[in-house]
Amino acid sequence: MRKRLLFSHCAFPALVFLAVSAFRGEAGAATTRQSITLDTAIDLALRSHPSEAQARAAVDVASARIEENRAPYLPQVVGTGEYQRLTYNPTGKPGIFIPTATSTPTGTSTSPTTTPSTSSWTRTSNFFTLGATASQLIYDFGQTSGRWSSAEASEAAAAHSEHAVEVQIITNVRKAYFQARALRDLIGVAADAVANQEMHLKQIVAEVENGMRPEIDRVTGETSLANARVQLISAQNAYDLACATFNQTIGLSTATSYEPGTDEMPPLLDEDAPLERLLESALHDRPELASFAKQRLAQEKIISATWGGYGPNLQAQASLAGTGVTLDNLAPNWWVGALLTWPIFQGGQTRGQVAEARATLRSINAQEDTFRLQVRIDVEQAALAVRATRATLGAASLALENAKRQLQLAESRYAAGMGGVIELSDAQVTQTQTAAQEINARFSLASARAALLGALGRR
C-alpha cells in the first residue's frame, strides 16, 4: 500500500508534464519562428518600428515649417470675385444734399435737395467685382527672418532627435536579442538536467530493485526528475516570452515571428577606458545633446523675432479691380501704394510673448543640464556593468568546470556505493545552477556592452 501511494505521488508531476508538453506542442505548431541575425533585426527595426516612423514624421513637420516661415518674404497675391444683387435707392444723412434731376425749358438740370428720391424694395440690380491685390513685405523688424532661422534650427534638432531614436531602437533590439539567446541556452541546460536525472533514476531503480538501495532513493530520484521537467517547461515558456519581446522591439505587428541567431557581441575597443574619457565621448556623440543645442538656437531666434513686435512693418501693395453691373462691361480701377503699420500699444502682448520665449529658453537649458546628469549615470552604470559581468563570467566559468567535476565524482561514488542519493541530487542541482549562471553571465556581458554603446550614443 505504501509503495502504491508513493508511486501515485511521484507519477503526478510526470502526468502534468505530459499534459503541458502536449499543450505546448499544439501551440508551437501554430507559431513558426524564423532565425534572424542581429544586423538583419536592426535593419528591420529601423524600417518598421513605429517610433522611427514617428521621428521621421517629426523631421518632415519641421521641414515644412521652414517653408511656412519663409513664405512672408515672397509676394502675396490674392484674387477676389464678388457678386451682389442689391437695391440702389439713394440715402442721405441730415445736412447732406442729394442731387436730383428736374426738367426745365432748356433741358434737364440738377438741384440739391434734402429729400431722397422715391425708394423701392423691388428696384434691384446685379453688381460684380473682380480683382487682385498683391503685397510684398519690405521690412518687419526681423520678425520673419527670426522665425525662418528658428524653423531651420528646429529641423536640425528634429534630425538629431531622430538619430537618438535610432540609437535607442538599436540598443533595445540588441538587449532583447541576447536576452532571448540566453533563455534559449537555458533550455539546453534544463534539457540536459532532465536527461541526467532520467539516467540517474534508471540507475537508482536498478539498485533499489536489487536491494542495494532503500526505497527513499527511488522517491528522491523521481522527485528530482519531476523538478527538472518543471524547470524545462519554465525555461521553454520564458524563451517564448523573450521571443515575443524581441519581436516587439523590432516593431513587428504581423504574424511573422523571429528568433535570434547565433551572433555574439564583440568587446568594445574602449570599454576599459577611464570613466571620464567615456563620459567625454558620450557628451560629444549623444545626439540628444546636439538636439538640445539646436533647440536652444531655435528659441533664441524666436526671442529675437518676438522682439520685432515692438517695431514697424512696411509693405508695398498694389490692386487691380473691375466693377460693374455686367461681366462684359466692368469699369477698371487700380492703385499702388505702401502700408506702414506700427503697433504703438498692444496691452502688453509683445512684452508677455518675449517673457514667455525667454522662460522657454531657460526650460530648455534646464532640460539639457538634467540630461547631462543622466548621461553620466548611464555611462557609469553601463561601464561598471561591463566590467562586473566580465569578471563574473570568469568566475562562473570556473564554477561550472568545478560543478561538472563534482557531478562526475558524485556519480562515481554513487555507483560504487560510497555516496548517497542526496549527494548525487545536490551535485546535479549545483551543475545545473552553475551552467545557468555561466550562461546568464555571458549574455549579461553582451547586454551590458549593448547598453554601453547606447549610453555613448553609438549605433
Image (spheres, helix red, strand yellow):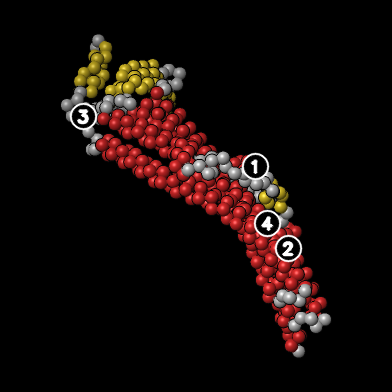
| Residue under numbered circle 1 | 39
Please report whichever mark, 4 or 2, sits nearer to the chain's N-terminal start.
4
Task: Give 267 or 102, whichever is nearer the viewer.
Answer: 267
Can you say which quadrant of the picture contains the C terminus? top right
At a point 40% along the width and 29% down the height, the residue shown is: 148
Let me know if residue 166 appears in the view: no
- Mark 4: which amino acid? Arg
Q: Earlier in the sequence, mark 4 or mark 1?
A: 1
Up/down of 278 relative to 418, above or below:
above
The secondary element bearing badge 2 is classed as helix
Q: CA distance from mark 4 to mark 3?
A: 96 Å
The relative height of residue 408 versus residue 70 in the rendered view (above or below) is below
Q: Which mark is residue 189?
A: none
**Nearer to the camera, 196 or 34:** 196
Between the C-alphas of marks 3 and 1, the distance is: 85 Å
Report the mark closest to the observer, 2 or 1: 2
What residue is shown with label 4? Answer: 184
Residue under label 2: 192
SS at badge 1: helix
Mark 3, other Cα within 10 Å: few <14 / some 14–19 / many ≥20: few
Spatial separation of the CA atoms under disc 4 and disc 1? 19 Å
Name of the residue lying farthest toward the left: 95
Residue 328 is situated, as x and y percent measured from the top left of the image, at 45, 18
What residue lies at 46% left-to-right and 44% top-to-bottom?
275
Q: Position of residue 163 (x, y in %)?
A: 52, 38
Q: Residue at x 36, y 29 (%)?
A: 146
User: Around disc 2, counting alpha carbons within 10 Å, would you say few (fewer than 14), some (14 to 19), or many (20 or more)?
Assistant: some
Gap between marks 2 and 1 measured at Cα: 31 Å
Residue 93 got which mark? 3
- Quadrant of res 241: bottom right
Decide which of tag 4 and tag 3 comes sooner along the chain: 3
